[in-house]
Image (cartoon, rainbow, N blue to C red):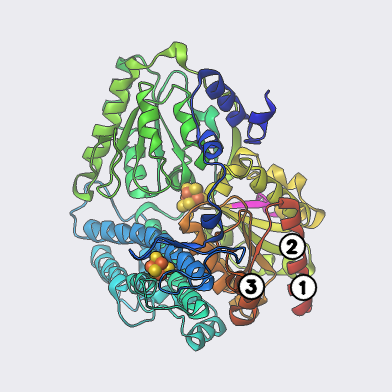
Amino acid sequence: MEERILRRSVDPASQAMLSLAARQGLETAWDRLEKQQPQCGFGELGLCCRHCNMGPCRIDPFGEGPARGVCGATADTMVARGLLRAIAAGAAAHSDHARDVAHTLKMTAQGKAGGYEIKNEAKLRRLAAEYGIPEAGRPKEEVALDLAEAALGEFGQQEGPIRFTRRAPPKRVALWEKLGIDPRGIDREIVEIMHRTHMGVDHDYINLILHGLRASLADGWGGSMIATELQDVLFGVPQPKRAEANLGVLKQDQVNIIVHGHEPILSEMIVAAAEDPELVALAKQVGAEGINVAGICCTGNEVLMRHGIPIAGNFLHQELAVMTGAVEAVVVDVQCIFPVLADLSACYHTKFISTSPKAKFPGAVHMEFHEETAYETARAIVRAAVENYPNRNQGRVFIPDVKSECMVGFSVEAILEALGGSLDPLLGAVRSGAIKGIVAVVGCNNPKIQQDYGHVNLVRELIRNNVLVVTTGCNAIACAKAGLLLPEAAAQAGDGLKGVCQSLGIPPVLHMGSCVDISRILVACAAIANALGVDISDLPVAGAAPEWMSEKAVSIGAYVVASGIFTVLGTVPQVLGSPNVAHLLTVGAEGVVGGKFAVEPDPFKAARLILDHIAAKRAALGL
Ligand code: NFS
Ligand code: SF4
C-alpha cells in the first residue's frame, strides 16, 4: 500500500478505505488538512484576535511587526482570551448536553416523554440523597422530578456550590475556595468567560486563566457529571459486556444504521426502534437479513457500553463508514459531526439524517427529535433507513473485513463490583507496586497525527510498565479496535498488572465510556484519594489526550489539571505565542492547583513523562 496512506492511520480498516478513496478520487479530512497547508502561523500560536471590529489584530511573534492589538492587547492577553473561549465552548457543549438529559429525566418523571423510563431506581435514590432530596417512601417519579429540577437549577444558579463538586476530597475543595475558582453555577461561569474576554475587560492572563479553570470545573464536576449520572438513571449503569469494534461490524446483508454524535437520548431510542418486530419484518420484506445499528464517536460509546451495540469507529472513521457504500442511514445529533457528511452521503444511497434543532446541516434530511414523541420519531427514522435498503448498489459495497472483540462498560460501580465490593484490592495492588499508577488516556483523533498511533502506542507503553489505563471517548474506540480492551490483552502488560488483571478477570485497559464519562474517572480519583486521606494531586495518576482536537478536550484538560492531575497533550494547543501563558500551564500551574500540562506528540516520550511523574508521586507517598 502507498506510503502516503500508511502514514495517515495505523488502523488497517482505515488504510483499506483510504486506499479506496484515493482510487475513486474521494476527498477526506486528511486531504483537506493537506490543502490547508501551511496553516496560519498566527492562529497556531494564538496570536490573532477578532473580539472587536477595530480588529482583526495579530501580533508578530518575531518581534518585528506589531506587539499589540489596536486596543493595546498583548500576546499574553490574546492567547489567554483565546484559550478561555475554547474552554467556554467545550464546557458549554458538555453542559448543554447535560441540560437536555436533565430535561428528559424531568419529562420522564412527569410521564410526558415517549418511551423513556427510569431504569435505575437505586441510583436515582442515591443521587437524590446526595442532593438532600427526601426519597424514602416517595414514588420514584416524584423523586426523579425533584432531582431533575435540582440539577436543572444548577445551570442558572448564581451562588455555589455545585453539588457534585463536593465529591472531591475536602483538601481539593478548600483549595478551589481559597483560589476563588470553586464554580458557582454552570452557565454563570461560561457567561463570565464571554464577558471577561470581550474587548476591554480582563487583560491579566493569570486572572483570565484562573477563571477558565473555574468554568472548566463547572464542566467536569458539574455539567459532565450531571450528564453521566442522570444518563445512568435513565438508561442504566453500564456493566461489563463483550462487543465488537471497527468498520467490519457493518453487514453486507443487513440494513446498516450509523448513530453518530453524543446524546444517548437519541441513540437509545434508535436502538430500541431497530428491535421493533414490525420494522424487523419490514427489513426482511425489502430483502435484508435484519437491522444492524452501529455507533461512531461518543453516542456510539453510550450504546456500546449499555447494550453491546457494535462500534464502527472513532472520529476519523465517520467519512470512511459512509464510503463503504453499505450504510442506509447516518443518524446524528450534536458534536464532532463533519458537515461534509451530508454531501458525501449524497454520493451514495445513504440518507444523512439530522435530528437536533440545534444542529442542522445543509443537504441533510431533518427529522426532529423531541422527548414527547421520541419513540415514534426513532421508528420513523429506522423505517426510512429500512426503506432505503433496496436503493443500495451492492456492486459498490466494500466493507473492510476488520473488526476486534472488546470488553466495555466499566462504570465506577462495575469496577467496584469487579473488585469484590471495595477499593481495597486496587489500593493494595497500588501500594505493593503491582500496579504503579492509574492513567486516563482519552480524547479525539486529529488528522495531524497518524490515526490511533498516539492512542495505541501510549496505552501499550503504559500497561507494559504496570500502569492501569482507564479510557473514554475516541481513545476507548482506538483501544477497542486494537484489541486492548480484552482480558487477554493482559498478556501485553507488565507482570504486576498482568497478575492483577488475571486474578480479577479484567482487561488492563478499562473502557469507562464517553467523554462526559471522564466524570466517572474524577469520581474514581476522588474515592481513591479519600480512601487514602490525601488530595487527588498526591495520587500516582495522570491524564493524556494523545490526538485531541476539540474545544471540549480543552475544557477537559483544564478541569483535569484544576483537579490536581498531570496531563500530557499530544497535539500542540494554540498558546505558544505567549511564553508566559505557556509557562503558567506547563510549570506554574503545579504550584497553584497541583497539576500541570505537558505537550509531547511522541507517545513513547509521553509515556516516559508519565512514568517519571508516577514514580515521583509514589516516592512522595512513601510507596
Ligand atoms: Ni470527545 Fe466524543 Fe471523539 Fe473527541 Fe469528539 S467523539 S466527546 S470530542 S472526537 S473524543
Ligand atoms: Fe484588536 Fe483589541 Fe479588538 Fe482584539 S479586542 S480585535 S486585540 S482591538
Where disc 3 sits, the SS reads helix
Residue situated furthest right in the rendering? 495
Residue, disc 2: 609
> Mark 1 or mark 3: which comes first in sequence?
3
Residue, disc 1: 616
Residue situated furthest top in the rendering? 395
Decide which of 225, 557 is in the foreground and name it: 557
Residue, disc 3: 583
> Mark 1 or mark 2: which comes first in sequence?
2
Q: Amino acid at mark 1?
A: Ala
Left or right of residue 360: residue 189: right
Residue placed at 45% from the left, 55% from the top? Answer: 237
Left or right of residue 289: residue 623: right
Decide which of 295, 239 is in the foreground and name it: 295
Decide which of 158, 58 is in the foreground and name it: 58
Residue situated furthest bottom in the rendering? 178
Q: Nearer the viewer, mark 1 or mark 3?
A: 3
